[in-house]
């Protein structure tokens, strides 16, 4: 066979590709009078579409994270994937976490209100912190992140200034939420890495991860350069990914690449350096234990003048009479995430391995005449373990937030009774543009995680989780009416405003 390229129309794209998740959640929550959470019961119904794809996996992820970043002694979490006469549903950034945590974060505000507690203090009292146990039985470690620090920072950003007073045109609201997600994959998921040193000391790297705009190649270059102690300019990445020739890559999904791919890169770098050191020991007629590697030279620890250039070892060391000492400088490695396991019959197991936690907040205004919600300022603080690329990680959060604001306020696929999409065009399906982009304040906390490269954790999907619940909670703060469904279109808010008028 031959490769086939197909370019669909916008309508064909809407109807033939996988849709994002449609989830309804029923949730009950119990707490003591002092604010200690005791129990949670959630039932998730997830529309899978007409064909079985990855929807079941999304349901699993959504269900076991429906508690949010809080400890409960008793959990009853159930998820159903339902066949519907609509297009198939598959993976979408956030993988069901944003939908289930809409429910948990709305419930946290509702429960705090019932207890007469400050919503943030109520959250802080129940955070999953070191030594606590999550819903699937995993004990949390210090290196899972400092959620309290994230929350304290966002609290100052959102509530450290007075809220604007209601005026003739607008009413104002603000809120914050706390969120969590693990890098998500299967227990057998593997990422491979091949490295080869060239005669000039540069290093070629081949990996099977797909660059889809998330900056994967930049991460490869930076992690490899750090591990090999060479400038990033000396790293060359093979960009043509082909399953016939590239190292094995299970899937490029789940906010996993930095964490798991980075492990594979470091392991391959360690093997490459070990091979170089072995060859250098033969050339310098000494033991490997007496040598030091600095990226440019390998030298005797007690006499750095006795050395050999790393570049001279790329093909093995070739003597003046043409004899080759040692082996080609190349290595192959792979990495899995440790302790991964599928859940048992009671839903218990090491399903997440590591988590990225954070806090997000919003300032918004609602136009009284139309019900239009405008996000004026959005705040995000995540504990990412170690920032690999400051510009790139900020861009990831910026984009994720705008994406999630679209889902919260404007984006909706509308079906007729037969399951046909009635708005398969961008002039009817409204995605946010630069005009709707709010000012964003973004910060990171760094609590190193030993699982990831240099302590880094995944952050690719986490920025999309908090916008919808934060906006819903802020709408209540603005008008005192609870809404529980997205998108929060102007007509829904207008109806809430009318109800508010009647109450007054």
Image (cartoon, grey):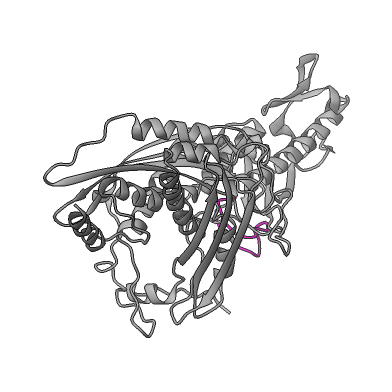
| In the rendered image, the vertical position of residue 56 relative to residue 114, given as above or below | below
Is 254 included in the stretch rendered in magenta? yes
Residue positioned 33% across, 73% down in the render = 414
Spot occupied by residue 499 in the image (x, y as percentages of width and height)? 22, 59
User: Which x, y percent locates residue 219?
Assistant: 55, 42
Q: Residue furthest front?
A: 33
Residue span colored magenta: 240-256
For the residue pair 53 and 371, the one nearer the viewer reads as 371
Query: Quadrant location of the N terminus?
Result: bottom right
User: Residue 1 vs residue 106: left or right?
Assistant: right
Asked if residue 377 shows in the view, the reply is yes
Residue 238 relative to residue 151: left or right: right
Residue drawn at 57 percent across, 32 percent down: 231
Along the viewing direction, whichever of 412 and 240 lies nearer the viewer? 412
Residue 274 on the magenta span: no
Left or right? Give the position of 153 relative to 184.
left
Residue 253 visible in the current orientation: no
Which of the two residues, 438 or 390, is positioned nearer the viewer here? 438
Using residue 270 as the reference point, say whether residue 225 is left or right of it.
Answer: left
């Amino acid at each position: 066979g031959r490769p086939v390229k197909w370019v669909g129309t916008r309508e064909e794209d809407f109807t033939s590709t996988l849709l994002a998740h449609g989830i309804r959640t029923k949730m009950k929550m119990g707490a003591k009078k002092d604010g200690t959470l005791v129990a949670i019961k959630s039932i998730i119904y997830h529309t899978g579409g007409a064909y079985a794809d990855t929807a079941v996996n999304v349901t699993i992820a959504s269900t076991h994270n429906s508690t949010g970043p809080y400890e409960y002694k008793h959990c009853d979490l159930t998820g159903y994937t339902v066949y519907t006469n609509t297009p198939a549903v598959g993976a979408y950034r956030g993988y069901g976490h944003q939908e289930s945590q809409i429910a948990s974060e709305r419930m946290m505000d509702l429960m705090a209100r019932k207890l007469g507690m400050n919503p943030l203090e109520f959250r802080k009292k129940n955070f999953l912190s070191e030594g606590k146990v999550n819903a699937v039985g995993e004990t949390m470690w210090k290196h899972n992140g400092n959620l309290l620090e994230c929350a304290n920072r966002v609290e100052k950003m959102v509530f450290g200034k007075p809220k604007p007073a209601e005026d003739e045109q607008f009413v104002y609201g603000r809120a914050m939420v706390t969120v969590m997600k693990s890098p998500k994959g299967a227990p057998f998921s593997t990422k491979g890495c091949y490295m080869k040193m060239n005669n000039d000391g540069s290093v070629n790297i081949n990996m099977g991860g797909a660059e889809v705009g998330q900056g994967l190649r930049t991460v490869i270059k930076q992690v490899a350069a750090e591990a090999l102690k060479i400038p990033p300019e000396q790293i060359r990445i093979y960009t043509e990914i082909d399953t016939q020739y590239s190292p094995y890559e299970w899937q490029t999904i789940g906010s996993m690449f930095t964490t798991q791919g980075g492990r594979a890169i470091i392991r391959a770098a360690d093997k490459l350096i070990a091979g170089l050191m072995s060859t250098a020991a033969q050339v310098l007629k000494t033991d490997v234990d007496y040598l030091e590697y600095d990226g440019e030279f390998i030298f005797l620890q007690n006499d750095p003048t006795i050395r050999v250039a790393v570049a001279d070892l790329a093909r093995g060391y070739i003597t003046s009479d043409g004899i080759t000492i040692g082996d080609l400088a190349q290595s192959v490695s792979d990495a899995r995430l440790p302790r991964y396991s599928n859940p048992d019959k009671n839903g218990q197991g090491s399903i997440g391995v590591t988590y990225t936690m954070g806090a997000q907040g919003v300032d918004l205004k609602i136009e009284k005449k139309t019900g239009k919600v405008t996000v004026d300022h959005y705040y995000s603080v995540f504990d990412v373990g170690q920032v690999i690329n400051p510009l790139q990680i900020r861009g990831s959060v910026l984009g994720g937030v705008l994406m999630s604001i679209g889902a919260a306020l404007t984006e909706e696929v509308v079906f007729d009774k037969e399951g046909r999409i009635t708005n398969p065009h961008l002039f009817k399906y409204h995605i946010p543009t630069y005009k709707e982009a709010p000012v964003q304040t973004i910060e990171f906390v760094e609590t190193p995680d030993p699982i990831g490269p240099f302590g880094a954790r995944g952050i690719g999907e986490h920025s999309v989780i908090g916008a919808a619940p934060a906006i819903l909670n802020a709408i209540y703060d603005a008008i005192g009416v609870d809404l529980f469904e997205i998108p929060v279109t102007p007509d829904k808010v207008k109806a809430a405003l009318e109800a508010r008028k009647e109450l007054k």
